[in-house]
Image: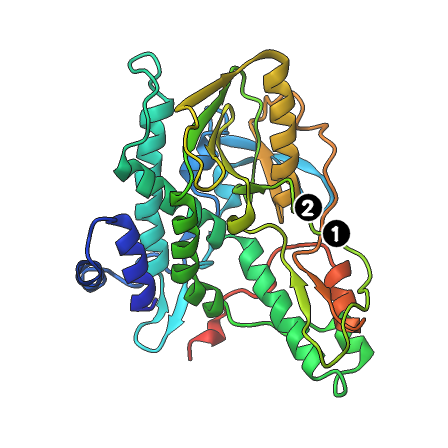
């Protein structure tokens, strides 16, 4: 992992440190780190502590596939992956530093959420402190960037670009059935700068904890949800000729943090961390909903969680409506508008799915 990623994230973990101080802390942390400690270990794209907040007491979830809707009751460990955040470096070969750093980010967020959600009998709702907000902003930003959607989007852009620039050298069959993929390092190199930008956007928003009287919420593999009245979801379909070949290609990636009216993250089966519109203060510290109002907002949030998910959605096995919930359509990760190329048609007609490339033994020689 590059020092740029470390400096960025350490700076976010210590919001009052100078740039020089962040660099020093990053070097100290890096010097004391075993870069291969987590190589080959199982870890979760959605942190284990967050999944536990939706699971049964024996740590099990009902999981539904976004590919075919099938459901099964599985342990939290079954949702783990290997080496999704392991990079390949010239110094150490396989490097799991990012996974180690994410564990620190997750630990801070887990502690804060326990303090605010799990002990209501002993304390009244209170605003997040500046330190708590900084830690939560970093956690939400990291969760938005670390998942399968960003990596799969990078794969789609790479594949489309190669085919567009070499359309006279690639057969129609290869355009439809062959995929050109970037290395997983490319996603990890982007991590620090993207997290910094998202966290900065979140800092401009006020927050509230929305709590429902019953456990009605679900979780998905892309749980950070963006909402706007102006920007709709990505729709699939054929590539429409919108520009001439010599003009710019338009790639639509859906709603971004800069133009989202609301950002939300379900943090338990009955609670949502809510970010309001940018530069608008005044959200109440906590909101409590019950009855029909709670049911309706849970249905809306659950639909958005399912729509955003790439591979799976999950809920407590006792959730009253999850097993029979109608899954929304699976949109493409991106939509491309060019002069009507076959490469764009393939992008627009392929539903989102798991990233294809995995770390392989021959990545390190």
**Label 1: how many Cα within 10 Å (few below 14, some 14–19, many 20+):** some
Query: Residue 260, located in which quarter of the rendered image?
Result: top right
Instruction: Give the residue at x 68% y 28%.
Output: 323
Colour scheme employed for the rendering of this structure: rainbow
Q: Is 355 above or below relative to 180?
A: above
Specify the quadrant that holds the N terminus: bottom left
- Quarter location, residue 222: top right
Measured as percent of width and height from the top left, residue 263 is found at: 51, 39
**350 to 264, vertically: above or below:** below
Q: Residue at x 33, y 12 (%)?
A: 121
Q: Which residue is mark 1?
A: 235
Disc 2 crowd rating (10 Å Cα; few below 14, some 14-19, many 20+) is few
Q: CA distance from mark 2 to mark 1?
A: 9 Å
Q: Is residue 55 above or below residue 259?
A: above
Out of 82 and 338, give the one closest to the viewer.
Answer: 338
* Residue 232: mark in rendering: 2
Q: Which of 57/259 is in front?
A: 259
SS assignment at label 1: loop
Q: Are marks 2 and 1 in contact (CB under 8 Å)?
A: yes
Q: What is the number of the mark on residue 352?
A: none
- Which residue is located at x 66 percent, y 34 percent? 303
Question: Furthest-front residue in view?
Answer: 280
Point out the frontmost of discs 2 and 1: 2
Quadrant where the image shows the C terminus: bottom left
Label 2, secondary structure: give it.
loop
- Residue 190 visible, this orientation: yes
């Amino acid at each position: 992992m590059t020092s740029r990623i470390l400096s960025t994230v350490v700076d976010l973990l210590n919001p009052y440190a100078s740039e020089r101080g962040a660099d020093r802390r990053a070097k100290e942390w890096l010097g004391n780190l075993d870069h291969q400690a987590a190589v080959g270990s199982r870890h979760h794209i959605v942190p284990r502590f967050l999944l536990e907040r939706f699971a049964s007491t024996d740590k099990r979830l009902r999981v539904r596939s976004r590919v075919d809707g099938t459901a099964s009751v599985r342990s939290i460990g079954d949702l783990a992956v290997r080496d999704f955040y392991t990079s390949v470096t010239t110094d150490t070969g396989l490097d799991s530093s990012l996974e180690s750093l994410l564990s620190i980010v997750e630990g801070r967020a887990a502690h804060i959420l326990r303090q605010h959600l799990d002990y209501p009998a002993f304390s009244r709702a209170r605003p997040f402190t500046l330190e708590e907000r900084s830690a939560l902003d970093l956690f939400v930003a990291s969760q938005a960037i670390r998942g399968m959607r960003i990596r799969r989007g990078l794969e789609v852009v790479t594949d489309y670009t190669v085919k567009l620039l070499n359309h006279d050298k690639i057969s129609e069959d290869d355009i439809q059935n062959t995929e050109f993929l970037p290395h997983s390092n490319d996603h990890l190199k982007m991590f620090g700068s993207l997290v910094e930008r998202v966290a900065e956007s979140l800092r401009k928003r006020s927050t509230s904890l929305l709590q429902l009287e019953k456990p009605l919420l679900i979780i998905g593999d892309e749980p950070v949800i963006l909402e706007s009245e102006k920007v709709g979801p990505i729709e699939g379909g054929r590539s429409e000729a919108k520009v001439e070949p010599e003009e710019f290609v338009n790639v639509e990636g859906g709603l971004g943090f800069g133009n989202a009216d609301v950002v939300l993250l379900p943090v338990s089966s009955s609670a949502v961390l809510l970010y309001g519109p940018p530069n608008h203060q005044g959200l109440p510290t906590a909101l409590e909903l019950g009855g029909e109002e709670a049911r309706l907002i849970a249905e809306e949030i659950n639909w958005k969680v399912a729509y955003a998910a790439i591979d799976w959605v999950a809920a407590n096995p006792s959730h009253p409506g999850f097993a029979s919930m109608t899954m929304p359509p699976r949109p493409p990760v991106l939509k491309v508008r060019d002069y009507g190329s076959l490469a764009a048609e393939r992008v627009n007609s392929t539903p989102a799915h798991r990233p294809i490339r995995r770390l392989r033994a021959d990545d390190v020689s």
